């Protein structure tokens, strides 16, 4: 019986915590604030410069190697920013 009560309290506490987290994330989204998470390794300007180099004739492989990323990542990041 004691374990049942403890389990019920733990579930209730988890539900309350989840509600607080969801409410906080919603408020931060509405305010346009950062939600945390991993920061981008490269800035938009770095990717735009890489795109400029590729368009100028530099090989994408060499540009990716200089940035220490794969070609697929380079192409994906360029596509994310738009052509």
Image (cartoon, rainbow, N blue to C red):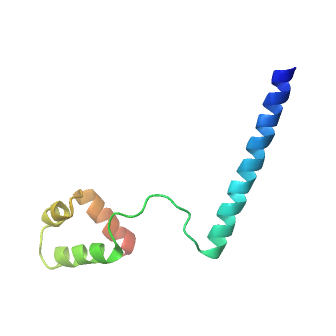
What residue is drawn where x is 68% and y is 62%? 24
Q: Name the image quarter holding residue 4.
A: top right
Left/right placement of residue 31 relative to residue 1 reads left
Q: Seen from this angle, which residue lies furthest top?
A: 1
Residue 82 drawn at (x, y percent): 37, 75
Asked if 15 appears above or below 23 in the picture, the reply is: above
Q: Name the image quarter holding residue 66.
A: bottom left
Residue 47 drawn at (x, y percent): 29, 72
Residue 1 drawn at (x, y percent): 87, 20
Q: Which of the image's four quarters has the C terminus?
A: bottom left
Q: Of 11 and 57, which appears nearest the observer?
A: 11
What residue is drawn where x is 31% and y is 78%? 45
Left/right placement of residue 57 relative to residue 7 reads left
Q: Seen from this angle, which residue lies furthest right?
A: 1
What residue is drawn where x is 31% and y is 70%? 78
Left/right placement of residue 5 relative to residue 39 reads right
**How many numbered discs sit on the rendered protein?**
0
- Residue 33 in view: yes
Q: Of 75 and 64, which appears nearest the observer?
A: 64
What residue is drawn where x is 68% and y is 68%? 27
Q: Of 67 and 56, which appears nearest the observer?
A: 67
- Residue 83 in view: no
């Amino acid at each position: 019986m004691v374990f049942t009560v403890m389990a019920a309290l733990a579930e209730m506490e988890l539900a309350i915590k989840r509600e607080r987290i969801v409410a906080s994330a919603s408020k931060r989204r509405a305010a346009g604030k950062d939600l945390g998470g991993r920061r981008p390794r490269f800035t938009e300007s770095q990717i735009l410069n890489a795109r400029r180099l590729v368009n100028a004739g530099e090989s994408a492989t060499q540009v990716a190697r200089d940035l220490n990323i794969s070609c697929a990542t380079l192409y994906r990041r360029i596509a994310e920013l738009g052509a």
